[in-house]
Amino acid sequence: MKLVLAVVQDQDSNRLLSALTDNNFRVTKLASTGGFLKSGNTTFLIGTEDVRVDKALQIIKENCSSREQLVSPVSPMGGNADSYMPYPVEVEVGGATVFVLPVEQFFHF
């Protein structure tokens, strides 16, 4: 058994949740916040048999796309003001960060 832990952008979360449940995956959805952009993410916990991990990864890949977004950087707090850029910069957001972890034991009470 494996635990698939997927961190996705909020914009992709509803589509991913629907696709996972349509394919009979049991999913726990948690609200989370990214450290880099300080924006909303969703973390999915998916417990599944080893043989279904590839299917879960395929569904995540198909439903979580990366895209470019303009972001206004936060002003430096005590940092070097010379390196501060007061104008928006384009960064890649979205996609999914996925961890697949082994599960020693599983209990359902």
Image (cartoon, rainbow, N blue to C red):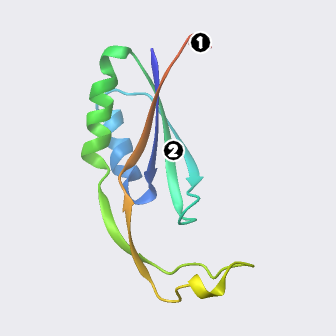
Indicate the secondary structure of the residue bearing disc 1: loop
Type of the residue with mark 2: Thr
Say above or below: 29 vs 3: below
Type of the residue with mark 1: Phe
Q: Which residue is mark 2?
A: 43
Q: Check the picture and name the quadrant holding the N terminus.
A: top left
- Residue at horizontal 50 percent and vertical 50 percent from the top: 42
Q: Check the picture and name the quadrant holding the C terminus.
A: top right
Task: Estimate how packed mark 1 is, as few (under 14), some (14 to 19) or many (20 or more) residues with alpha carbons within 10 Å.
Answer: few
Indicate the secondary structure of the residue bearing disc 2: strand
Marks 1 and 2 in Cβ contact (< 8 Å): no
Q: Position of residue 101 (x, y in %)?
A: 49, 24
Q: Specify the quadrant of the image occupied by residue 90.
A: bottom left
Marker count (numbered): 2
Q: Position of residue 83 (x, y in %)?
A: 57, 82
Q: Position of residue 62 (x, y in %)?
A: 24, 44
Q: Taking 107 as reference, is 100 left or right?
A: left
Looking at this view, is 102 or 13 the one in front? 102
Q: Which residue is mark 1?
A: 107
User: In this rendering, which labeled residue sits more in front, label 1 or label 2?
Assistant: 2
